[in-house]
Image (cartoon, rainbow, N blue to C red):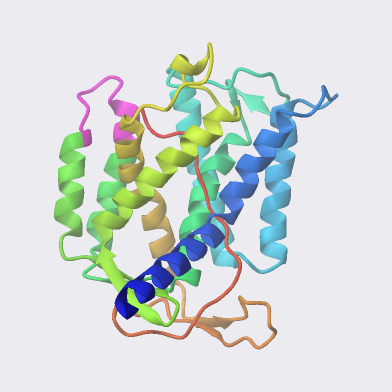
Amino acid sequence: MDKICGGTGQLLRFGLLQARCCAFAVALVAGIAVSGMLPELPVARYDLVLAYGVLLALVARWVGWDSARDTFVIAACHLIGLAFELVKVRLGSWSYPEDAVTKIAGVPLYGGFLYAAVGSYVCRSWHLMELRLTGYRPKAMALLAAGIYLNFFTHHWLPDGRWPLAAAMVAVTTGTWVGYTVGARRHRMPLVLAFVLIGFFLWVAENAATYVGAWSYPHQLDGWQPVALTKFGAWALLISVTFVLAERARRRAPARVHDDDGDGTGDDTEDDTGDDPVRAPARVAGPAAAGAGPGGV
């Protein structure tokens, strides 16, 4: 019975941590939903959401949820996401049907925040759950992530390499474990399983985002319908791009001490070079941020 109660407690703590990591995404999608309920305004809804997204990012930086390094990763995800959007919208994979001033080639600039939110989730998870990797192959993962990103463009003209890339993902991550902290205990799971789980919940988030009108797939233009389950697999692959960016930023930066819990003590030691998923490093605490956006088609 003690083991069952202990397991339930750990699961609840894990759920709470994940909710904190997803704060940015939840706030972003909630803002999009509210914007759709407002009466007609002199400002286009997409422009209003862009301003709201910028405000969210500034608040996250101001209160210390995101470090300068996190902000760099999140901004990079925003730019990568916008490039992705420009190509996919042009090809008709999905659309943003409403007008806006801040809209380029059919893509509102706020669209990049959907990917920035994913970057925020990964960064916050690294802090709040004290992620540590063992058996990680940075060069192979970087090459694979680049191939996955390019395939979501090239499969419109060339054979789709999604399944070979998925097989390569399993091969490259074989023996790679991600260690994380829940409460006072350390746990670990295979990195590929983490990608699959994140991909599934991003698919769930994508359903929520399209429901509130963040964007629309062709089959949703006449009324909302669930996002195709194939997007689950797309996200499980695409999350590797964000993960590689976040890991590389941490590997290149020295370890530092920061006050992420806002208690003014500065005792939240971050040891980004740690590679032991069983050893419990210094605790990191603090609010979180995270995300969702269109999956590859």
The answer to whether 267 is drawn above or below residue 133 in the figure is below
Q: Position of residue 49 (x, y in %)?
A: 70, 36
Q: Residue furthest front?
A: 1
Q: Residue at x 30, y 54 (%)?
A: 142
Residue 285 horizontal side relative to residue 177, left or right: right
Residue 51 falls in which quadrant of the image?
top right
Residue 114 horizontal side relative to residue 273, left or right: right
Quarter the N terminus occupies: bottom left
Q: Position of residue 165 (x, y in %)?
A: 20, 41
The answer to whether 202 is drawn above or below residue 211 in the figure is below
Q: Position of residue 268 (x, y in %)?
A: 55, 83
Q: Residue at x 40, y 71 (%)?
A: 10
Residue 5 falls in which quadrant of the image?
bottom left
Q: Residue at x 53, y 11 (%)?
A: 222
Instruction: Give the magenta range.
Output: 150-162
Q: Position of residue 26 (x, y in %)?
A: 59, 48
Residue 155 lies within the magenta run:
yes
